[in-house]
Amino acid sequence: MSDLQQAPTTVTNIGVVMFTVADVDAAIAFYTDKLGFEVRADVSFGDSGEYRWVEVAPPGSVARLALNAPMNGATPGGGGIGAPSERAAERVARDLADELVSDETARNLYGYTPVKAAE
């Protein structure tokens, strides 16, 4: 037994948990075919219907998983808090070095222009 006491949580329900996935249709197939989830929503949105909102859940569950393709140059599996334009330049440079974002994404999403080393 642990001597630590756990404080009670104030969270009483989880409605939707969002996941960025590389292939929405493959993710739907995994959750429905392999795990037995059901599709609760599959709706196009955006000015030209270019985005898609998909929710899956176990039968009878009130909690749902939203399976979304990356938007605005983001990479699958990632997430963040805050406006991309406010991300520190040093962090964007690190993401570039770690190949987490492309030069194009750094410019378009973060407003960052990569500095190339002099040759």
Image: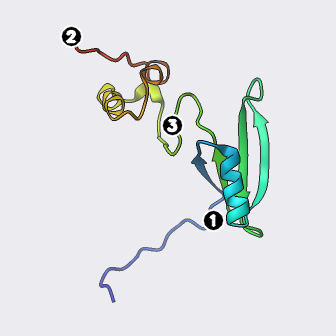
- Of all residues shown, which one is farthest toward the left? 119
Q: CA gap, disc 1 to disc 3?
A: 28 Å
Q: Is residue 64 visible?
A: no
Disc 1 secondary structure class: loop
Q: Are marks 1 and 2 in contact (CB under 8 Å)?
A: no
Based on the displayed image, in which of its 4 quarters is residue 99 positioned? top left
Residue with the mark numbered 1: 13
Q: Which is closer to the viewer, label 2 or label 3? A: 2
Disc 3 secondary structure class: loop
Q: Which residue is pictured at 68% across the width and 59% down the height?
A: 31
Q: Which residue is pictured at 57% across the width and 28% down the height?
A: 72
- Tell me the quadrant of the picture where the C terminus can be found: top left
Q: CA gap, disc 1 to disc 2?
A: 54 Å
111 left or right of 119 in image:
right
Q: Which amino acid, mark 3?
A: Thr
Residue with the mark numbered 3: 75
- Tell me the quadrant of the picture where the N terminus can be found: bottom left
Residue with the mark numbered 2: 118
Whole-percent x, y for residue 102 in the image: 43, 26
Whole-percent x, y for residue 71 in the image: 59, 32
